[in-house]
Image: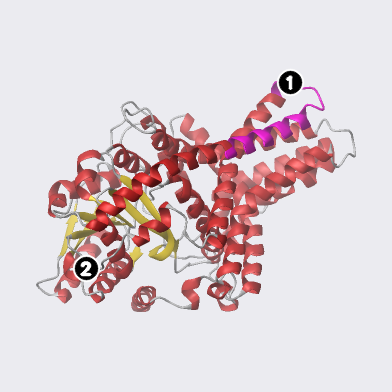
Amino acid sequence: MPAEVTDEAAASVATTHRLGNAWTARRYAVFLVVAATLAALVAAFSLVLAAGPLGFLQILNISAFALASAWTVLGFWNSIIGFALLCFNRGGFGGGRALGTMVSHMQLRTRTAIAMTVRNEVPLQFIARLKVTKASLDETGQGACFDYFVLSDTTDPELIDEEERAIGAWLAAAGPDHRIVYRRRSSNEGFKPGNVRDFCKRWGSDYEFMVLLDADSLMDGRTIVRLVCAMEENPQLGILQSLIVGILPPSLFARIFEFGHRHGLRCGAAGAVWWQGDRCQFWGHNAVIRLAPFSQYCEMPYLPGKGPFSGHIICHDQIEASFMHRAGYQVRVLAEETGSYEGVPPTLLEFAHRNHRWCQGNLKNLRVMAAPGLAAIDRFHLGVVAQRFISWPAFVVFVLLSAICAATWPAGVLFPSSAALGVYLVWLAMFAAPKLLGVAEAAFRAPRLYGGRLQLAAGGIVELVFMLLLTPAIMVGATIFMIGLAFGRALVWEAQSRDGYRLSWRTAATGLWPQTLCGLALAAGLLATNAAAVGWFSPFLAGLILAIPFAVITSNAGWAKDVGLCRLPEEMTVPPEIQAVADTLRRSDGAA
């Protein structure tokens, strides 16, 4: 901790004590509201099925529906709370906005390491982002408070050579006082957490804080200084970050996805911060971390046994946050879009591969829930993130069992009951609510950032159709992947493809034929048993049957940006950091 605790720090401690009881009350209230909503949904669905014989399949269907709906209900209420706070609460919203008032100075007193982890990445791309981050920090006048580390786990011989040449050129251009360190490990032991742990052992004691970046991360200097100042003034803060948004979308897929993700994240995060308080989510990068407790308390456990749920931790973020909170430090989020950026997967296949990595990693994290000393909120985070992935195969099971139930409807009956239609429409509304509320909030508060209300509305409609097509393909893919995990088939963690590329029909068919086959089989079964029921399943069927053309068409970089479809704020007014990265990458592409 800093040698001197300021009056502002003492005030922030007192504020935290006052907020503590409020956070506890909010957590109980949100839990009760979410539980009551989920119970009402499940009860309504049970009444629909109770109209006929209630056997084993019906009970299994009700259970699958409950498991599939829990994440949807939580996201719905987070967004409702966040929308209300962002649009109607002029005084801010407790824990999230209060952090901004903790920064009474913008002159740093400590030293901070900017650490970027890379593995088999294109050197010119990640170096461009780190160079721009450094230049932006230098422009604040406080660049001397930061040192820079490239923590490489690269194993590809060609990329190693490129990496070393590119780093060497950067060091030569930066001069003798560059404050840049390049370190490459000979093995990838412990994955990214092992890479960061090696940094902590070698250099962690030299710095008060670390700003952890991924290879596709970009942060502007003003945001970093603001976050570090907040950490200096509040010695209780262990991890602090703002919202991370995607930039430079390299394809139509990335553009539409980021548009929807941006709007869903803004309201959802604001609502979550309101009740999570001192133990918010941690996304593993673009965050300021207090190094002393992180080094002492946040080392990842090695999970004994064999198979995909043993060995080194893959998804480290929620465990590190839990261990930091267990040690008595806060994990906080500024629910604001402010100078913190990352890349976006360019195609459906890349997006699915990333989700599969997260799926395996977060299911493995369930083994850490029993760790001694964790607070209930820590166990909640570990469990609820894993539940998000479990909800996907649960929904697939629910659809299949519902199709079997539909086969028992009387011939020619379109709707088995008004109650069934009501449950169907309510669930769809809750599923779509986070994105729709995000678009409404943007239209209410700052429509010009997205090109105006008409463009916002058009983007919202396009993104809703996009998500209805994307979600079934992702759910079925995740189900197949989890079946493989159950039989011991683990995913090999490889570098992500970050560049846009045109997906070929052959590649798309190779990756997505199971989804297409499942969709055709389900449609054939419904047509053979009760053709009138096909309409109920049409959103799910469309996402599966159209998965291959959807993947190919959305991989195109094409026309969307030119016509302003799903426009992002960084395109209306381009921040200088983003422009600098774009210019560098454009020059490198031209040289290639």
Percent position (x, y) of residue 136? 28, 73
Three-letter amino acid code at disc 2?
Gln
Label 1 vs label 2: CA separation? 68 Å
Rendered position, 310 above or below 466:
above
- The extreme left residue here reads 176
- In this image, 74 relative to 326: left or right? right
Rendered position, 544 above or below 463:
above
Q: Which of marks 2 and 1 precedes in the sequence? A: 1
Label 2: which residue?
107
Residue at screen point 76% across, 37% down: 525
55 or 507: which is nearer to us? 55
Which class describes the residues within 10 Å of circle 2: few (<14), some (14-19), or many (20+)? some
Three-letter amino acid code at disc 1?
Gly
Task: Give the extent of the magenta segment.
Answer: 33-57
542 or 103: which is nearer to us? 103
Rendered position, 144 above or below 517:
below
- The extreme top residue here reads 55
- The disc at residue 551 is none
Which class describes the residues within 10 Å of circle 1: few (<14), some (14-19), or many (20+)? few
Task: Kindly report the secondary structure that dominates the magenta region of the rendered protein.
Answer: helix
Residue at screen point 31% across, 33% down: 311
Percent position (x, y) of residue 586? 38, 77
- In this image, 562 relative to 227: left or right? right
Q: Is residue 122 magenta?
A: no
Q: Is residue 455 visible?
A: yes
**Quadrant in which the C terminus is drawn:** bottom left
Label 1: which residue?
55
Q: Across the whole image, how many numbered discs are drawn on residues?
A: 2
Mark 2, secondary structure of its residue: loop
